[in-house]
Image: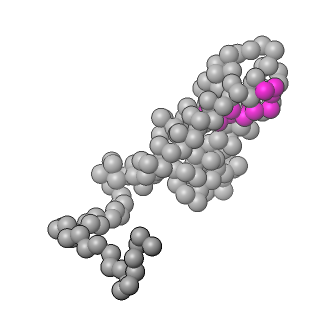
Amino acid sequence: MGELKAHCMAQTNNDADDLQDFLPFVNHYLNEGYDILVGVWEPGKHVEARPPQTDGLTVEYPILVGDADVPRLPYWCHRYIADYATWLLYRNGNPQKQSRGERYRISFEEGKNRMTAEGGKAGAEVAAGGGDMSRIVNVFPDKPQAYDPPRQAPGFDPLE
């Protein structure tokens, strides 16, 4: 989480005037972005507020609390979590800051689209040689059909 915070602060230009305004919200925004991406990566799953090992249960996606905590998503997804937090930090500012944050929202949306396009966790397992992902094959017939123009009702004149 420390790396994500640093990335987020770098994206906001480490503005000392804004730092006191941003810091109370950064952790919450990072976890919110993490939760959204977990749902894209593995539909139906969410970040859990429990520590990783509670009551002998393993938490698959624990909430990020300390600076050493790392999201349990592929590394290439981490920047999109920081982009989400940066967008939200700028969202509550003046119109100039809001427009500055818009590119981070767009980047976050592109990241969600990339995760979806790659099939999320199931797609990663297939790419690694495991898992099963059904695909539709042979949707079109092997031989193209001859064109058969639509028939018109007797007595129909399209020029009338």
- Residue 88 pos. (x, y %): 72, 34
Q: Which of 64 and 109 is in front in this view?
A: 109
Quadrant of the rendering where the N terminus is positioned: top right
Is residue 61 depicted above or below 12 in this figure?
below
Q: How many labels does the image show?
A: 0
Is residue 58 depicted above or below 96 in this figure?
below
Is residue 84 depicted above or below 158 in this figure?
above
- Residue 23 pos. (x, y %): 77, 26
Apparent side of residue 18 relative to residue 109 in the rendered image (left or right): right
- Residue 47 pos. (x, y %): 64, 49
Residue range of the region highlighted in magenta in the rendering: 83-95
Residue 6 colored in magenta in the image: no
Residue 92 colored in magenta in the image: yes
Residue 148 makes an appearance in the image: yes
Q: Residue furthest bottom?
A: 154
Apparent side of residue 130 relative to residue 11 in the rendered image (left or right): left
Q: Quarter-wise, where is residue 22 in the image?
A: top right
Q: Quarter-wise, where is residue 24 in the image?
A: top right
| Residue at point 25%, 73% (across, down) | 148
Is residue 2 depicted above or below 152 in this figure?
above
Q: Quarter-wise, where is residue 160 in the image?
A: bottom left
| Residue at point 36%, 60% (across, down) | 133
